[in-house]
């Protein structure tokens, strides 16, 4: 019996398809974010601005960190919170590599928070994508640094007593050359910002607001993936030149996406003495 | 080869440069900081880079990242910082990353006495991290030894794709001595084995006969997978007992099988002795003249210095010790290496004689510790 | 041959530098085996600094004991624990003491050279910071331990170029003091 010929997805060439299916739940936003990033990388490669053999994905631990399983580039799935220092070592040892860090908000801004702020302070030549889902999903729904106030999590069963961390504001207060926020409900902005960041030097930070209906959705009563996507979409507002004071993530007032910081400060590699 | 006058820490730095060090990551800590300061001054002119990170966690992880980008990498610290590197060392074990970690022992636990030496981190060097693994640990006793064993540490790290601990202490770190420094080409420098197959045939964790997989690095088109989870030969995460058993067995066995290359001991008057004193590091430095003085008085006593603490060549150590009726282990801790020596020494009666001091051990102290059991 | 040298002073007087210089010259230009063990307090300035140095013909003689118990030369830039250090001195020990910081009597049977080295450095060279080199110049003259030219080579190797001249001058000024 002849089998119908499978049509490959145009981005399959950047995936280790033998490792599919992936582990992400139905309704998870990570796949949308990854797809948008790969389209941006594809554009850079097609333009001859990026060598596919020089792209390195470095991730820590968590759902978002599993990106390194599936991308068909040099990739490192390292320790929880330590993707940024690992990536820093990679970049400084071979500056010709384009080093991309992907992680969740717990990985990047929680356990790895000190590394994040120092990498931004150094204007280290890395592109860091933080996928925010407001919860520790892989471990079953515990408190994340971005979990909103009063929200139930498995480790704050009486409601989260801590106001959330605004990571965009934190990184923007440092020496990063690029700070932007997009949402999985606006994948074209993820692609646009990734494309732009890949053409810049220094520390580039992109927060992607994502959906996690399976774990976070259960906590806030948005268990249905479509409903959660729609609810997030309603709240996301793109602004061409947002100011940092409107970067707080507020489910009532809305979530402002856009490019918060674009500058051309000398990067670490511009300033460090090397042989 | 030329003569120099250097401190233990500077000798390590010089040897690291000769070995091809290109990336040093560290965080200031007494008594290791001057090693980093010396490298920060010199390494850029050899094409390398020295970065002060926000902590020791970042330092070890950056060194591992640099190694995967294809350069020789090192970090140095002391007990408290070494504790912070625990998880990073386990990452280097699991991902089979060549990296040299220098621990300049001070007095612990906790902040302890930063400027003073003990041998209290011996087990930390051996079993710092979680997981079932074996890594090489070297213990120099002089500035020359610091130099030579740093070269050896890099060679072992590259040859076996493993983290290596060079365990010095505050006494040796800041002691200055005449030493012979090698010129490039005068000593063997080993580089990691590269894959001989094209990228489409490459399996990143498929070992050779020596149980060490050839190492492709980032940027060479091999689409390398660095995987901290338990993985198969492709670097793919596996959760089954068979894969786990194979990986753990190989990680330990590649070191055990390399023991002939890794392990070194030095014997003095062991052949004809009724008693042998075993010591290492800066404590051995004072055991040696004590044993010599005892022999001058006619005592049939020998001295065995461990240059490698782990893995021990148990066969070789047993051969040297089992002839003696007594084995006396002298350490500046409450008995660490002693436990292994007692197990290995066979029929010899074994005694542990600590010389616990934060100052360089004195002749009389060590004499008392040894003579007590003769 | 095994010579022991004890160097004592206050942090900031260049005690460790003297040790490294003597060690370098002896190791590199004279083929001796040398060790120097440094002791210092946590303070960067002030506090006692000490170097125990051993210079020997063979590795064996240098290697065994790195502490000074029978000094051939004592260089005392500051009178910390003066009495206890002087107890180490034998009749044939050369003791160099900076009198700038010690006005009282010095009782010893050793060969004592007590001068106001720091004040001399101030007066002759307008620079008290090179007192250590001035004193070393005097040690070189009196003891013949190291040739003056080799010490200059050592200074040139150890110190930044802009400090060479001042240190050479101090060394020579010390060398010109009466033996």
Image (cartoon, coloured by chain):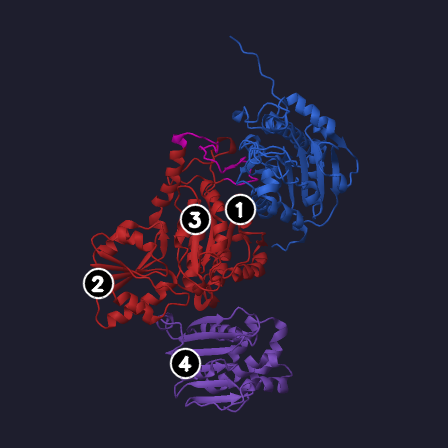
Chain colours: A blue, B red, C purple
**Front-most of B334 and B174?**
B334
Rendering coords of residue A268 (x, y %)? 66, 50
SS at circle 4: loop
- Marked residue chain, label 4: C
User: What residue is pinned by disc 3?
Assistant: B128
SS at circle 2: loop
> Which quadrant of the figure has residue B133?
top left
SS at circle 3: loop
- Marked residue chain, label 2: B
> Is residue B112 shown left or right of residue A205?
left
- Whether residue A54 appears in this view of the structure is no
- Marked residue chain, label 1: B
Q: CA distance from mark 4 to mark 2?
A: 35 Å
Q: Are marks 4 and 2 in contact (CB under 8 Å)?
A: no
- Whether residue B8 appears in this view of the structure is yes
Q: Which segment is the magenta one?
A: B216-243
Q: CA distance from mark 2 to mark 3?
A: 36 Å
Question: Mark 3 or mark 1, which is nearer to you?
Answer: 3
* Callout 4 and callout 2 share a chain: no
> Which quadrant of the figure has residue A185?
top right
In magenta stretch: residue B254? no
Number of disc labels: 4
User: What residue is pinned by disc 4?
Assistant: C71
User: What residue is pinned by disc 2?
Assistant: B273
Name the image quarter holding the C terminus of chain B.
bottom left
Please report the residue visible at 62 percent of the width from the left and 45 percent of the height from the top: A116
């Amino acid at each position: 019996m002849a089998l119908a010929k499978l049509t490959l997805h145009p981005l399959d060439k950047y995936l280790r398809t033998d490792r599919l299916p992936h582990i992400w739940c139905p309704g998870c936003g990570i796949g949308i974010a990854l797809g948008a990033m790969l389209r941006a990388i594809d554009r850079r490669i097609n333009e001859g601005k990026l060598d596919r053999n020089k792209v390195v994905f470095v991730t820590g631990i968590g759902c978002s960190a599993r990106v390194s399983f599936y991308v068909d580039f040099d990739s490192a799935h390292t320790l929880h919170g330590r993707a940024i220092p690992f990536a820093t070592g990679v970049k400084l040892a071979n500056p010709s590599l384009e080093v991309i860090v992907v992680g969740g908000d717990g990985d990047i801004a929680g356990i790895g928070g000190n590394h994040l702020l120092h990498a931004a302070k150094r204007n280290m030549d890395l592109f860091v994508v933080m996928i925010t889902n407001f919860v520790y999903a892989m471990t079953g729904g515990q408190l994340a640094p971005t979990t909103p106030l009063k929200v139930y999590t498995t480790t704050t069963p009486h409601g989260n007593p801590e106001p959330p961390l605004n990571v965009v504001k934190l990184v923007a207060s440092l020496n990063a050359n690029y700070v932007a926020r997009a949402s999985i409900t606006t994948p074209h902005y993820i692609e646009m910002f990734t494309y732009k960041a890949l053409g810049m030097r220094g520390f580039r930070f992109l927060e992607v607001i994502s959906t996690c209906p399976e774990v976070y959705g259960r906590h806030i009563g948005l268990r249905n993936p479509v409903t959660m996507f729609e609810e997030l979409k309603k709240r996301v507002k793109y602004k061409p030149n947002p100011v940092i004071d409107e970067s707080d993530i507020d489910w009532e007032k809305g979530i402002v996406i856009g490019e918060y910081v674009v500058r051309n400060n000398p990067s670490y590699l511009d300033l460090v003495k090397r042989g | 080869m030329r003569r120099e006058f250097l401190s233990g820490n500077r000798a390590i730095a010089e040897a690291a440069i000769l070995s091809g060090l290109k990336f040093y990551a560290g965080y200031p800590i007494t008594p290791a900081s001057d090693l980093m300061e010396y490298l920060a001054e010199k390494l850029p002119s050899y094409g390398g880079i020295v970065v002060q990170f926000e902590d020791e966690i970042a330092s070890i992880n950056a060194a591992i990242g640099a190694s995967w980008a294809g350069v020789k990498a090192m970090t140095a610290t002391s007990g408290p910082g070494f504790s912070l590197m625990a998880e990073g060392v386990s990452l280097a074990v699991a991902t089979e990353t060549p990296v040299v970690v220098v621990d300049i022992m001070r007095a612990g636990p906790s902040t302890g006495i930063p400027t003073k030496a003990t041998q209290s981190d011996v087990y930390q060097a051996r079993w710092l991290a979680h997981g079932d693994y074996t890594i090489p640990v070297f213990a120099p006793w002089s500035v020359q030894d610091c130099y030579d064993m740093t070269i050896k540490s890099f060679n072992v790290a590259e040859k076996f794709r493993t983290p290596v601990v060079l365990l010095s202490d505050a006494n040796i770190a800041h002691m200055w001595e005449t030493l012979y420094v090698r010129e490039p080409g005068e000593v063997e420098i080993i580089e990691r084995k590269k894959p001989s197959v094209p990228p489409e045939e490459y399996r990143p964790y498929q070992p050779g006969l020596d149980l060490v997989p050839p190492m492709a690095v980032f940027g060479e088109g091999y689409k390398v997978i660095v995987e901290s989870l338990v993985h198969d030969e492709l670097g793919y995460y596996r959760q089954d007992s068979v894969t786990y058993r194979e990986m753990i067995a190989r990680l330990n066995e590649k070191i055990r099988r390399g023991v002939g290359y890794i392990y070194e001991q030095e014997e003095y008057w062991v052949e004809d002795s009724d008693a042998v004193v075993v010591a290492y590091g800066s404590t051995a430095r004072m055991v040696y003249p004590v044993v010599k003085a005892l022999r001058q008085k006619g005592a049939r006593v020998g001295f065995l210095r461990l240059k490698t603490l782990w893995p021990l060549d148990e066969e070789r150590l047993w051969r040297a010790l089992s002839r003696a009726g007594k084995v006396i282990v002298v350490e500046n801790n409450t008995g660490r290496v002693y436990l292994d020596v007692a197990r290995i020494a066979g029929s010899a009666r074994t005694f542990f004689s600590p010389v616990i001091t934060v100052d360089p051990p004195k002749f009389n102290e060590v004499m008392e510790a040894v003579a007590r059991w003769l | 041959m095994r010579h022991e040298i004890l160097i004592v002073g206050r942090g900031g007087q260049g005690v460790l530098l003297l040790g490294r210089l003597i060690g370098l010259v002896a190791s590199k230009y004279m083929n001796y085996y040398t060790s120097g063990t440094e002791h210092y307090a946590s303070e960067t300035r002030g506090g006692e600094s000490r170097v125990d140095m051993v210079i020997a013909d063979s590795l064996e003689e240098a290697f065994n004991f790195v502490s000074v118990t029978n000094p051939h030369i004592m260089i005392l830039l500051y009178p910390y624990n003066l009495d206890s250090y002087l107890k180490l001195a034998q009749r044939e020990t050369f003791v160099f003491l900076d009198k700038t910081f010690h006005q009282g009597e010095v009782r010893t049977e050793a060969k004592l050279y007590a001068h106001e080295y720091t004040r001399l450095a101030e007066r002759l060279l307008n620079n008290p910071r090179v007192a250590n080199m001035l004193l070393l110049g005097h040690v070189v003259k009196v003891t013949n331990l190291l040739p003056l030219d080799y010490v200059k080579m050592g200074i040139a190797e150890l110190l930044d170029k802009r400090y060479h001249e001042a240190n050479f001058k101090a060394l020579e000024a010390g060398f010109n003091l009466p033996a």
